[in-house]
Image (cartoon, rainbow, N blue to C red):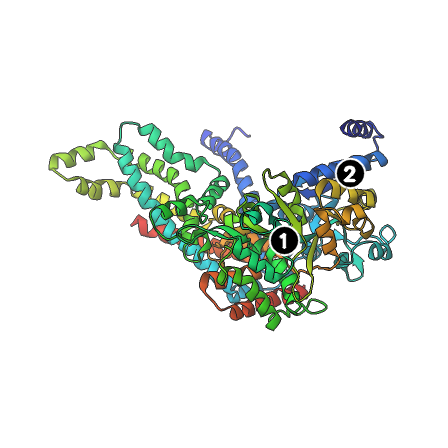
Amino acid sequence: MRLLIAILFTLTVAGPAAAVEIEYWQYSYKTRLDAMDKLIAQFEAENPDITVIHTDFPYAQYRTKVAASVAAGEGPDVVQLYYGWLSDYLSAEILQPLPTSEFPHSEIEDEFFPMVGNMNVKGEYYALPTAVRSLGLFWNKKLFRDAGLDPERPPQTLDELVDMAKKLTKYDRAGNIIQVGLTMGPINQDHNWWREVLVRQFGGAPYNEDTTKVTYDDKAGLKAFQYYADFVLKHNVSVVDFMDKGEIAFKAGRAAMHIDGSFVLSTFQRARRLEWGVTELPSHNAIKANFSSYWVNGITSKAVGEKKAAAEKFLKFITTNQAMQLWLDDVGELPARKAVAMRAENSDHPLYGAFIRGLDYAYTTDFYSEAAQRKTVVDMLDRIVLTGMGVAESLSIAAAEDQKIIDEGRIE
Amino acid sequence: MSKSRTIAQRRAIWAWLFLAVPIIYFILVRFYPTLDAFSISFTEWNIVGEKTFVGFDNYVRLWDDPVFWIVLSNTFEYLALGVPISMLLSFIIAYYLDQVRFGHGFLRACYFIPFLTTAVAMAWVWRWFYQPVPIGIINMALGQLGIVQQGFLRSTTQALPAVLAPAIWAGLGFQIIIFIAGIRAIPTSYYEAAKIDGAGAWQVLREITLPQLRPTIIFLTVISSIGFLRIFDQVYNMTQEGEGGPLNATRPLVLNIYKAAFEDFEMGMATAQTVVLFTILLIITIIQLRVLRK
C-alpha cells in the first residue's frame, strides 16, 4: 500500500506543471490525518492536474486560525468544521454554498442520513460530512466482573444504569470516590446526552420544531436533569470531571461506565489491558434516543475560478461511498451515507454496530453557538453541585440563558 | 546632504534615520492597531464582512452583561492577590538569597527556572496536582494528614487562587533577579555607616534597603500589575475547555476578550473590552507611578 502511495505520489509530482493547488485544513488527530492523506493520494492520482495541500492545527487553535486566515484571504479552499459551528461560519461569511449542479439536493436528501439536513440553510447546502458520530455506552468488563456483575451484560435501561453504577463505585476510607460507577462530564458529551436523549426519554423535547424556543424547562426536563444530577447528589456514584476527563478515567480503569462518541473507539482500542465493550445507550420508558454529530467539509469563500472547480471536485471525492468506507476502516467514524453504514459488516460490527444502530433514532441539535450552549448545561450542573442551588431553579436559569443565545443568534 | 549643515545637525539626522525603523514598526504594529481597536469597538463586525457602526451599543451590552462584571471583578482579584503576594515573596527570597553565599548561583537558578518554563506545560502539571483523589497529589497529601479533600479547581472560591498560584510562582524568578540587582546596587558605604552608628538589621532594612529600592519596587509593581491584569495562559489551560470555570469563577478579562473575538466572532464586543482593559491599565499605572514616586 505504501509503495502504491509512493508511486502515485511520484506520478503526481511528475505530472503536468499547469496544476491547480488547493488547500485542505482539518484539526490534528492522527488517524484522521493519515486517512485524509490516503484519500488525497487517491484523488491526486485521479486528477493529476490538482494538488491538495493538507494542513492541520491543534484543535484548540483550529477555529481561530480558520477565521483569521479566511478573513485575510488566505488559508483553506476546503475546510473541515464541526456541524455546530455552521451558523458561526455563515455569519462570518467563511463558507460559500455548494452548487446544485455538482451536489444535487435530491441526492443529498435521499442518500445521506437525515441529520445532514442541518447543513441546509435557507435552501442552500453549505457543507457535507464524510463521517458521522453517535453516542454509545462504554463499559469496563473487568470492573463488572470484580463487582459480581455479568461482564457481558451492560445496562439496558436508565434504572439499571443507576443500580449497576452503585455496585461499581469504590470509595477510600475517608469516603472519597476512587472509582466512579459512571463518568460525569457535561463539558464533554454528557450535555448532548442530557439534551437530546434524557430529556426525550423523560417525555419532553429540548426545543420546539424549528429550534427557536427552549422547551426543556418543564416537568420532563426537570425529571431528566434530576436523574442526571442524582448520580452525584443522591447516589454518590460519580464525581464531575473525575480525573479531569471521563475518557481518561475510563482508559485508566477508574471508571466502570462512560458515555462517549464513536470517535473515542480508537483511543480505547489502543489502551492495553483494558477489557471493554460498547453498547447502545440505555432506554427509558421504552424510548430510545441518541445524539449524532458530525464534522463536515465546506468550500470557503476564498476559493474562486479554477480553484473553486478543483475544490468542488475534491469535496465530491471525499464524500463518496469508497471514501466513507475508508474513513470507517481507518478512523472508526461512521459513514454518512446510509448505503455504506447499513452494509451488514458495518451495522453488525461488534464495536461500530452499536453506534450505527444508534443513528437510526438519533437527533442532532441545531446549535446556535455550540460552545455557549454547552456552557449553559455545564453551569446548570455546577450551580447545584458547587453552590447548592435547587435543581428546578438551576434548570430555569439554564433555559433562560440558552433562550438568550438562541434569540441573539436568530437576529444575526 | 548639503555642506552647510553642522556636525550636530548631521548627527541628529542620522540618529533620526536609525530611530525611524523602530518608530515606523511601532506605529504600524502597535499604535495603529491600538487606535483601530477604538474605532472597531463602535461597530459590529465578524472579522470577515462589512463593519456596521453601532455607536455605544457594545459598551451598553457589556454594562448589562452580568458575566462581564464577574470577569472584571475576577481580573481585579488576580491583581489584588497577585501583586502583593508575589512582591512580598520575591523580596523576602531576594533579601535572604542575597546573604547566602553557599550555593547562591544554584538557588537563584532554581527560582528562575519556572520563569523560563512554558506556561502551558506548567499549567497542565498544576492542573493535575489539584485533582481530587486518587490522582491529585495535593489532595492525596492532605488525605495522609487527615485533612478533608479540597475542591481546588472544582470550587467556586478556591479555583481563582489555585489558578493564580502557578502564575505567581512562574513570575517569581524574574522579580527575585530584579530585586537582587536592586539590593546589590545600594552603595555598601550606607551599610557601613549604619553599622558604625549601631543600627539593627530591622532598622537597616527600613531606613536604607527599602527606601533605596524604591525605583525597583515601582518598576516591579507596574510590570507585575500589568502581568496579572492580563493573566490568560494559566486560566486557559487549567480550566475545563479553557472556559474559565467553574461558573466563571476564574475567567479573566483577557479570556473573555479571546472568547468574544475568536469563538463568537464578535470583534466589536471584543475590542470594546480591550478598550476597557486599556483604560484600566492606564489608570492603574498612572496611580502607581504617582503614589510610589512621592
| Badge 1 density bin: few <14, some 14–19, many ≥20, Cα 10 Å | many
Say whether residue A130 is visible.
no
Between tags 1 and 2, which lies in front? 1
- Viewer-side residue, B263 vs A208: A208
Q: CA distance from mark 1 to mark 2?
A: 37 Å
Looking at the picture, does residue A338 appear above or below residue B104? below
Image quarter in which the C terminus of chain A is found? bottom right
The reply, left or right, for residue B198 in relation to residue B17 is: left
Outermost right residue: A101
- Viewer-side residue, A315 vs A257: A257
Secondary structure beneath dot 1 equals loop
Q: What chain does mark 2 sit on?
A: A
Say whether residue A146 is visible.
yes
Q: Who's the residue at 51% across and 46% down the image?
A: B237
Q: Amino acid at mark 1?
A: Pro
The reply, left or right, for residue B188 in relation to residue B15 is: left
Which numbered tag is attached to residue A39?
2
Secondary structure beneath dot 2 equals helix
Image quarter in which the N terminus of chain A is found? top right
Residue A48 % position (x, y): 84, 34
Residue B249 % position (x, y): 46, 57
Q: Which residue is mark 1?
A: A154
Residue B267 % position (x, y): 60, 55
Q: What chain does mark 1 sit on?
A: A
